[in-house]
Image (cartoon, rainbow, N blue to C red):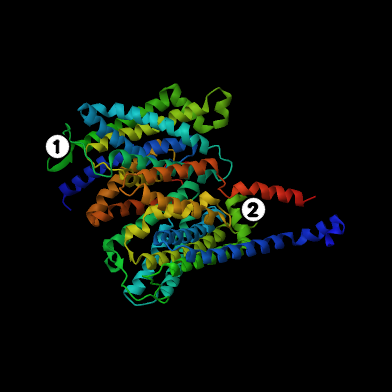
């Protein structure tokens, strides 16, 4: 492998890895907050992509401009999913783990069906964007602008999330609820409200990822499922609930995937990621940054 | 009229063998239900409905297999499609390439699958909760990707079974589907019986103890790891036999059609719906879920419009939320009330 080819693989892996991190961080946040894995996370991503697609058709604006709107829509969806479904799953007295898995799975299937009903199973893509189809040439290393943009959005989102968690009352309430759910009730924090806002925040983050992906990826009702598994692997690799873990694991996943694609046939590119994930959790069951 | 004897004496006489009597009654009811089900295919002449019946019986058997590990032992596997695929592929390759009868192929697939489960259980059972579930998804996905790229087993093209005259030997019946229904029922009966036997044995108690609180069970001397391994092996064995049957039934398999994630879900859902960790939950769940999905698919989703998926998703969600203990628990209260009356 020449230095240039190596640099190309590294750069592509890094850019995609940052986007994976952005897809995964909302999942990790929600888990850290309330010990719930959202099995509809991939469908949230899929809806964010459709929302971008639909809004572009409707407004003829560029997806980049529409991103905050998509994030806001997903915020509402996330909060609604908590208030309408997950809240009740948490109340189950028997088989709580299983109830929570199947309630969010049911939601995932429902959302997939709804997408198929509304948009048909056809593949869509967003055309005529500022970023679409352009690449940056860095001395023979070619980087597509949509991916560069996605990586920048991801880094900005992680920065913003860090500030939100450390500097705002909401962030402190989130952190406190995560530390001790019983104690926060005593100091007058409304747990349901914190959870709903946490779900909204998690969904808004995956909304950003969806808006970014919609620019360079085909949109169809099953697209969420293909990213969801990578997201679960990223979260488990980084450690459930760890925001920093999601960032590091996302980058690792992107890099490993890029290198696997060079060594193995492209259809096997995920195998390297899965194998790495298994190797890590078998040695460290709580993931890289997780707490047990 | 021996009921005129003193009631306390009768109660005392009943108390020691109450458990055994209840077990015997369960067994008799079970055999009666299975016998009644054996007559059912003769009453259904419509080929489409026969197909629904066969799938229902098959998924009931597969859900009961899943239930052994997920319901009794509490390890929520979302990767049983791997074992299903191993069964389907062993049976198909051995039959189509080597001419070995499906019966032998299923058995070989079952044994291979149990060995794989033991091999995977070794690292996986150290993982707790969601980490375990996600590891099982990932492992099944790796299996799917490998089979996809493995030319010896047909790669993405899959394996087509040859057409042979109807025969119980090769498990091929082109004209009449009734034998398939009976095979699926036989499989269900076998899994049900094994579950019944385990439920009353030391393993059954160990598994439930592991499910309720692994640490407490360990402190009481339960071999937690060995319990999980045993449950995984039995569960994988029957799932693979079901996979072999499915391959014989549809006569064509490819990686997506036997190993995709939706199968892992389809094995768990009926058990969750009916009631996990119970003898009848998977059958009740399958009897509700499979006809509903099959019929809604053909009436609502024919054009791929997604309505069937919406209905299915909503159903899964509502049942999980409304009846966390499963549909069977609707009857549990009356049983609890009966027990209350029985104990003075």
Q: Decide: marks 2, 1 in contact (CB < 8 A)? A: no
- Return the residue nearer the eye: B22 or B233: B22
Question: Depth check: A72 or B35 in front?
Answer: B35
Is the N terminus of chain B in the top left, top right, bottom left or bottom right quadrant? bottom right
Q: Is residue A146 left or right of residue B104?
A: left
Identity of the residue drawn at 52% across and 40% down: B321
Q: Position of residue A75 (x, y in %)?
A: 38, 29
Disc 1, SS: loop
| Callout 2: SS | helix
Label annotation for residue A134: 1
Instruction: Give residue B271's position: percent from left, percent from top.
Output: 51, 53
Q: Nearer the viewer, mark 2 or mark 1?
A: 1
Looking at the image, residue A86 sits to the left or right of residue A153; the answer is right
Q: Quadrant of residue A104?
A: top left
Chain holding disc 2: B
Of the pair B286 and B153, the residue shown nearer to us: B286
Depicted B326 relative to depicted A88: above or below: below
């Amino acid at each position: 492998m020449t230095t240039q080819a190596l640099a190309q693989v590294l750069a592509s892996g890094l850019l995609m890895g940052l986007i994976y991190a952005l897809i995964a961080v909302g999942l990790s946040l929600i888990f850290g907050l309330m010990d719930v894995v959202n099995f509809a996370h991939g469908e949230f991503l899929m809806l964010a992509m459709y929302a971008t697609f639909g809004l572009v058709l409707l407004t003829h604006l560029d997806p980049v401009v529409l991103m905050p709107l998509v994030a806001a829509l997903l915020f509402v969806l996330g909060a609604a999913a908590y208030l309408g479904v997950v809240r009740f799953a948490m109340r189950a007295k028997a088989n709580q783990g299983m109830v929570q898995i199947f309630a969010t799975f049911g939601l995932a299937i429902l959302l997939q069906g709804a997408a198929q009903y509304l948009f048909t199973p056809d593949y869509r893509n967003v055309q005529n964007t500022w970023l679409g189809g352009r690449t940056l040439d860095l001395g023979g290393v070619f980087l597509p602008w949509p991916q560069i943009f996605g990586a920048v959005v991801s880094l900005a989102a992680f920065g913003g999330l860090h500030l939100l968690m450390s500097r705002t009352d909401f962030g402190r309430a989130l952190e406190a609820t995560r530390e001790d759910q019983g104690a926060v009730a005593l100091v007058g924090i409304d747990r349901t409200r914190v959870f709903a806002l946490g779900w909204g925040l998690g969904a808004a983050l995956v909304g950003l990822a969806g808006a970014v992906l919609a620019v360079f990826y085909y949109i169809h009702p099953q697209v969420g499922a293909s990213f969801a598994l990578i997201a679960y692997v990223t979260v488990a690799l980084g450690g459930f609930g760890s925001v920093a873990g999601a960032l590091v694991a996302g980058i690792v996943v992107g890099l490993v995937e890029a290198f696997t694609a060079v060594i193995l046939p492209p259809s096997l590119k995920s195998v390297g990621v899965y194998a790495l994930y298994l190797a890590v959790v078998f040695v460290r069951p709580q993931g890289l940054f997780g707490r047990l | 009229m021996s009921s005129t004897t003193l009631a306390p004496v009768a109660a005392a006489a009943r108390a020691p063998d109450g458990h055994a009597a209840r077990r015997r009654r369960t067994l008799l009811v079970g055999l009666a239900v299975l016998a009644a089900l054996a007559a059912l295919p003769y009453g259904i002449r419509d080929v489409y409905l026969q197909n629904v019946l066969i799938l229902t019986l098959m998924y009931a058997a597969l859900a009961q297999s899943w239930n052994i590990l997920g319901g009794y032992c509490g390890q929520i596997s979302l990767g049983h499609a791997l074992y299903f695929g191993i069964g389907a592929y062993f049976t198909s390759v051995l039959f189509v390439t080597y001419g070995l009868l499906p019966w032998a192929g299923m058995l070989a697939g079952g044994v291979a699958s149990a060995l794989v489960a033991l091999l995977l259980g070794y690292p996986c059972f150290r993982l707790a909760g969601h980490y375990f579930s996600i590891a099982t998804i990932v492992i099944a996905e790796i299996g799917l990707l490998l089979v996809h790229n493995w030319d010896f087993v047909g790669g993405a093209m899959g394996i087509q079974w040859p057409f042979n005259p109807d025969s119980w030997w090769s498990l091929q019946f082109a004209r009449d589907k009734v034998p398939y229904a009976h095979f699926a029922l036989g499989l269900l009966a076998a899994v049900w019986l094994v579950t019944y036997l385990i439920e009353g044995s030391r393993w059954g108690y160990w598994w439930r103890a592991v499910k309720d609180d692994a640490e407490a069970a360990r402190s009481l001397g339960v071999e937690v790891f060995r319990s999980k391994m045993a449950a995984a092996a039995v569960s994988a064995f029957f799932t693979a036999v079901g996979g072999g049957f499915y391959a014989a039934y549809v006569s064509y398999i490819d990686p997506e059609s036997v190993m995709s994630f939706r199968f892992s879900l389809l094995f768990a859902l009926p058990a969750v719906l009916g009631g996990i960790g119970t003898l009848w939950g998977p059958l009740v769940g399958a009897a509700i879920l499979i006809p509903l999905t099959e019929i809604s698919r053909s009436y609502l989703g024919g054009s791929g419009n997604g309505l069937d998926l919406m209905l299915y998703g909503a159903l899964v969600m509502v049942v999980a939320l409304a009846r966390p203990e499963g549909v069977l628990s609707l009857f549990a209260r009356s049983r609890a009330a009966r027990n209350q009356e029985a104990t003075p």
